[in-house]
Amino acid sequence: MPFVNVYYHENKLNKEEIKKIGECIHLSLIEHFNIPENDYFQLFLSYSQNHFLYNPYYLLEGGEKRTKNMIYVSITCGPGRTIKQKSDLYQSISLKISECSSIKKTDIFITLNETAAENWSFGQGLAQLVK
């Protein structure tokens, strides 16, 4: 049940790149969070440079620097994954995106937001995950 938001600088990604990045994230979620293949909800949002603020060096190793190609990947999902599953997911997403696009691993910022099943409605005014 993940819901993925990807934030990026305007004019930095085209339709094809958005599709590839979305597929990379989805494949990583299937592999590491064992989500169903058809559980696919993603939103890509672009922002102007004036609205995209970050420290280019914060917590990067080896003097690496973030660039204007940086993306924020925010994943809202259910609880219950181990620290290893989460770490493996971060590695997988970063590797896959860096291999399928011009975005470097240092430009991929990922957050997970865990929320309980009763906080989801997939439409029809129902909480489908609550039994």
Image (cartoon, rainbow, N blue to C red):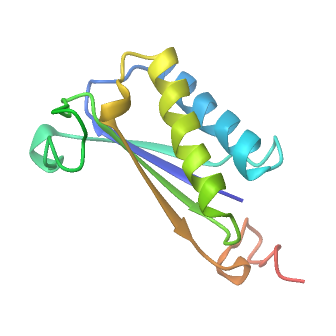
Q: Position of residue 1 (x, y in %)?
A: 72, 59
Relative to residue 54, is residue 127 depicted above or below? below
Percent x, y for residue 88? 60, 45
Q: As drawn, which residue projects farthest toward the front?
A: 62
- Residues 87 and 7: in front is 87
Quadrant of residue 69 within the rendered picture: top left
- Relative placement, left or right, of 116 versus 129 is left
> Residue lying farthest left?
50
At 66% from the left and 64% from the top, the residue drawn is 82
Indicate the quadrant where residue 50 lies: top left
Compared to residue 76, the image places residue 21 above or below, namely above
Q: Residue furthest right?
A: 131
Residue 9 lies in quadrant: top left
Left or right, 105 with respect to 89, comes to: left
The answer to whether one can see residue 42 in this image is no
| Viewer-closest of 80 and 46 | 80
Q: In the rendered view, would you say 51 is above or below 126?
A: above
Res. 102 in view: yes
On the image, the x and y values in percent for residue 128 come to 83, 73
Q: How many numbered circles are shown?
A: 0
Tell me residue 85's x, y (percent). Answer: 66, 53
Q: Is residue 78 left or right of residue 128?
A: left
Q: Measuring 31% from the left and 34% from the top, which residue is drawn there?
A: 107
Q: Depth check: 55 or 3 in front?
A: 55
Q: Is residue 41 above or below residue 22?
A: below
- Identify the residue shown where x is 68% and y is 73%: 120
